[in-house]
Amino acid sequence: MEKSKIERINELAHLSKERPLTEEELAEQKALREEYIREFRAQFRATLENTVVQDPDGTRTPLTVYNKKDNKN
């Protein structure tokens, strides 16, 4: 995400503490936050997909996808 967009998110957050945001500002804030979360999740997923666990015997096991729905604990 561009630095200017992150700065705008922070600017809107500070403004919201000083006064109520206008409808346009609220819509902009929502769109920017959604974009930020989407990009964060994509980067985090890429990091996890390239992560491996190395056992003491030297074997390397890639992380697998965890689905809450399948977990019966």
Image (cartoon, helix red, strand yellow):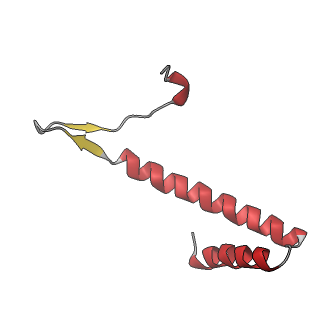
In x, y percent, where is residue 69?
A: 56, 25
Q: Is residue 72 left or right of residue 53?
A: right
Query: Residue 2 is drawn in which quadrant?
Result: bottom right
The residue most toward the left is 57
Give whichever of 10, 28 is nearer the camera: 10
The answer to whether 15 appears left or right of 23 in the picture is left
- Against 10, is 63 above or below? above
Residue furthest toward the top?
A: 72
The mark tally for this picture is 0
Q: Compared with residue 55, is residue 28 higher up or lower down, i.e. above or below? A: below
Q: Which of the 4 image quadrants contains residue 35?
A: bottom right
Q: Is residue 46 above or below residue 9?
A: above
**Left or right, residue 73 beside residue 61:** right
* Residue at image point 78% right, 68% down: 28
Q: Give the image location of residue 59, x and y in percent.
A: 16, 36
Please give the name of the residue rendered at 49% of the width and 23% of the height, measured from the top-left corner: 71
Q: Residue 18 appears in which quarter of the rendering?
A: bottom right
Image position, residue 62 (x, y; %): 30, 38
Quarter of the image with the N terminus is: bottom right
Nearer-the-camera pick, 10 or 34: 10
Q: Residue at x 50, y 30 (%)?
A: 67
Identified at 34% across, 48% down, the residue is 50
Spot the residue most to the right.
23
Q: Where does residue 55 sit, x and y in percent of width and height?
A: 17, 38
